[in-house]
Image (cartoon, helix red, strand yellow):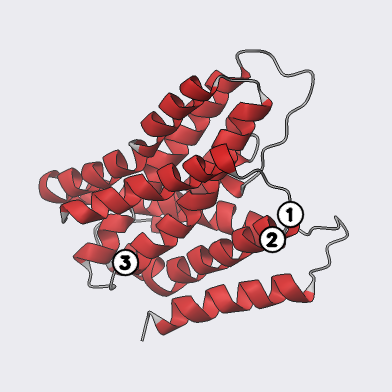
């Protein structure tokens, strides 16, 4: 892959996190609308592009099983991240001081998998759609990470270092995908299927969360979801 693709994967969470040092989430509704848009775009790109790569490759049997495993893997990761990859940054008073380490472990594992499907778009001529989807996903993810670190009273300098290290993980995932494509394409397709399950879990969780907690969407959220899905479709034709 071209080096600028790795740069985009690095800059998306890094810029999102950097914004959090200067702009706190005063208007939560607008932040959630951005999450809804990015979640819809990610889900739609996965359905229109990524899953066709997984199920039409012929490199692995029982691809659906690996998708399910990826779905439940993300469920386990959320026990570490507490939903940070959905844009959540809630802190409870009973959190142990080691909470920051479990969050970083979980979000870095998740981010590594996030970098893997970007290679599918470059390799199968999907016009960087997966790269765009992941960049939109990583922006609020980086933002939420820095806000959470601030709520945990982590020093600004330490938060910046953690953000920098975290931003390197998604490019590492893309590099791993490139490596396995040359060395063992079957392993790469298994990773694709696992990531497909992760994407299903994260994107649908974002989509079906409601601001009111009453399982009703506002017209603004419906518009954001529709716009995200439409944009994904337009990039597929």
Residue at 48% of width from left, 46% of height from top?
70
Q: Earlier in the sequence, mark 1 or mark 3?
A: 1
In the image, 206 versus 32, the foreground residue is 32
What kind of element bears circle 3? helix
Label 1 with label 2: CB-CB less than 8 Å: yes
58 lies left or right of 165: left
Task: Tell us which disc is closer to us: 3 or 2.
Answer: 2
Residue 76 seen: no
From the image, which quarter does the C terminus lie in?
bottom left
Determine which residue is flagged by label 2.
30
Q: Nearer the viewer, mark 1 or mark 3?
A: 1
Q: Residue at x 56, y 27 (%)?
A: 103
Give the x, y percent position of residue 56.
Answer: 30, 69
- The answer to which quarter of the image holds residue 170 is top left
Vertically, is 80 above or below 60? above
| Mark 1 residue crowding within 10 angstroms, few (<14) / some (14–19) / many (20+) | few
Q: In the figure, is residue 13 to the left or right of 72?
A: left
Confirm whether residue 117 shows in the render. yes
Around disc 2, counting alpha carbons within 10 Å, would you say few (fewer than 14), some (14 to 19), or many (20 or more)?
few
Residue sitting farthest toward the front: 22
Q: Residue at x 48, y 51 (%)?
A: 139
SS at mark 1 in the image: loop
Query: Would you name the residue on which mark 3 appears?
Result: 53
- Identity of the residue furthest to the right in this view: 214
* Residue at which label 1 appears: 27
């Amino acid at each position: 892959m071209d080096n600028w693709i790795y740069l985009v994967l690095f800059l998306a969470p890094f810029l999102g996190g950097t914004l959090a040092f200067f702009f706190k989430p005063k208007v939560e509704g607008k932040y959630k609308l951005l999450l809804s848009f990015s979640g819809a775009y990610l889900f739609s790109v996965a359905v229109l592009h990524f899953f066709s790569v997984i199920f039409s490759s012929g490199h692995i049997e029982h691809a659906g099983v690996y998708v399910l495993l990826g779905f439940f893997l993300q469920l386990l990761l959320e026990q570490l991240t507490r939903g940070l990859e959905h844009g959540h940054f809630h802190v409870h008073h009973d959190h142990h001081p080691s909470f920051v380490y479990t969050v970083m472990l979980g979000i870095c594992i998740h981010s590594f998998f996030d970098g893997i499907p970007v290679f599918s778009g470059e390799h199968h001529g999907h016009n960087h759609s997966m790269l765009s989807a992941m960049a939109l996903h990583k922006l609020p993810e980086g933002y939420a990470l820095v806000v959470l670190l601030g709520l945990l009273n982590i020093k600004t300098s330490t938060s910046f270092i953690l953000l920098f290290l975290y931003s390197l993980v998604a490019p590492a995932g893309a590099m791993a995908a490139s490596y396995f494509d040359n060395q063992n394409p079957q392993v790469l397709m298994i990773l694709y299927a696992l990531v497909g399950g992760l994407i299903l879990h994260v994107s649908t969780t974002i989509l079906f969360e409601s601001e009111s907690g009453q399982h009703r969407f506002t017209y603004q959220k419906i518009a954001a979801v529709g716009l995200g899905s439409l944009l994904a479709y337009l990039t597929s034709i």
